[in-house]
Amino acid sequence: MARKVGYTFKKQYKEINFVYDKFNDIYEAVAAAEGIDLTRYHAMEAQVAMTSKGSQAVKDYRLKEFERFGFTNIHFIRDEEQ
């Protein structure tokens, strides 16, 4: 089942389709939609995960890096039943 993801990239709001078959999470999907290579990001994220005691450090790193890339307000869009 396809879902929609909304995000703001460099002050411009966009929506894309998202399926778990192609991407692990919505952050990978929005980066792919904007053509951003996440190779170095994934390597550093793995290092943060290995050295931190909890998952909060990984979440904080993810949010800070995606803000640095130019993303804000990444979220799933609810399908309202009509």
Image (cartoon, rainbow, N blue to C red):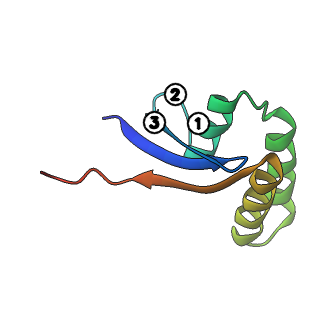
Q: Quadrant of the N terminus?
A: top left
Q: Secondary structure at mark 1?
A: helix
Please identify the quarter of the rendering in which residue 43 is found: top right
Q: CA distance from mark 2 to mark 1?
A: 8 Å
Outermost residue toward the left in this view: 82
Could you tell me residue 3's position as x and y percent? 37, 40
| Viewer-nearest residue: 58 or 14 | 14
**Which residue does the numbered mark 1 point to in the structure image?**
29
For the residues bearing labels 2 and 1, Cβ distance under 8 angstroms: yes
Q: Which mark is residue 18?
A: 3
Q: CA distance from mark 1 to mark 3?
A: 7 Å
Whether residue 18 is situated above or below residue 26 in the rendered picture: above
Q: Badge 3 local density, few (<14 within 10 Å), some, or many (20+)?
A: some
Q: CA distance from mark 2 to mark 3?
A: 8 Å
Q: Is residue 74 left or right of residue 1?
A: right
Whether residue 58 is situated above or below residue 29 in the rendered picture: below
Disc 2 or disc 3, which is closer to the eye?
A: 3
Q: Which mark is residue 66?
A: none
Which amino acid, mark 1? Answer: Ala
For the residues bearing labels 1 and 3, Cβ distance under 8 angstroms: yes
